[in-house]
Image (spheres, rainbow, N blue to C red):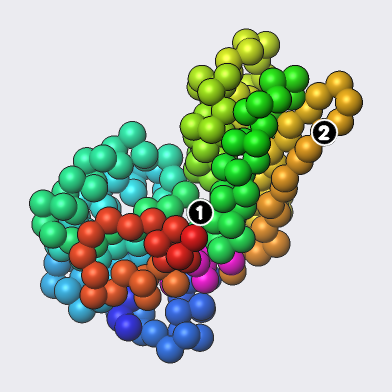
Amino acid sequence: MNIALIGYGKMGKAIEEIALQRGHHIVSKIDIDTIDQFTKENLSKADVAIEFTGPHSAYENLKKLMQFGTATVCGSTGWLEKLDEIQNDCKQKNGAFIYASNFSVGVNIFFEINKRLATLMNAHDDYEVQLTEIHHTAKKDAPSGTAISLAEQVLENLPRKTNWVNHISDIPGELEILSERIDPAAGTHKVKYSSAVDDIEIIHTAHTRKGFALGAVLAAEFLKGKKGIYGMKDVLNL
């Protein structure tokens, strides 16, 4: 498979390594120094583009990719207020698109556990719930996209919580997400339910970026030749 990398930082390089190991070819590497190569002609050589940049560039990158009709896997976070627009662009172009806040296989299993736990805890309002996420200091957005996904899953399955906030709160309906930035953390997410008698915690800790990179390549392999909008649940058959 031919892959275009949109974003060639640490994640882009990790994705390249995994893709090459799996027998794929990198036909374009687009970053700030090679932005002139971000053209429809160059992207037409790719079966799938994998976009990992930042919150300030992802939206414009995705607008271009949808206009080009390029099947796209996106892992950038911090731009999701415009996700519906990008998905509509994809539909209008009869394209293919996967967005995930986290491509790690382990994290996506963790998502399913989180939803189930929140459902079970709904009947036990003596437990208070709090989320914590820890990342490296270079991460530009807070809370992380993964933490937001976890929080939204809790809100969906635990009606006594109505919205999430990125700070300590004494308002009962608010779900706290606490963000810490510590080097060299690759990413830790914790969901903790506390009562007067005990605590229940689920934790996912990433050791390297390789898990995220592998998931992104698996998503690209899944998306090749398809049309439509998918998620990691489709890729992993969860």
Q: Residue placed farthest to the right in the image?
A: 197
Determine the image quadrant of residue 24. bottom left
Identify the magenta region. 211-217
Q: Residue placed farthest to the top in the image?
A: 171
Q: Measured along the vertical axis of the image, is residue 191 above or below residue 91?
A: above
Q: Which mark is residue 102?
A: 1
Q: Measured along the vertical axis of the image, is residue 155 above or below residue 60?
A: above
Mark 2–mark 1 Cα distance, whole angstroms, equals 26 Å
In this figure, which residue is indicated by the disc labeled 2?
A: 199
Q: Can you say which quadrant of the picture contains the N terminus? A: bottom left
- The residue at 33%/47% (across/down) is 57
Mark closer to the chain start, 2 or 1: 1
- Which of the pair 44/148 is nearer the observer? 148
x, y percentage for residue 120? 65, 36
- Which of the pair 179/132 is nearer the observer? 132
Q: Which mark is residue 195?
A: none
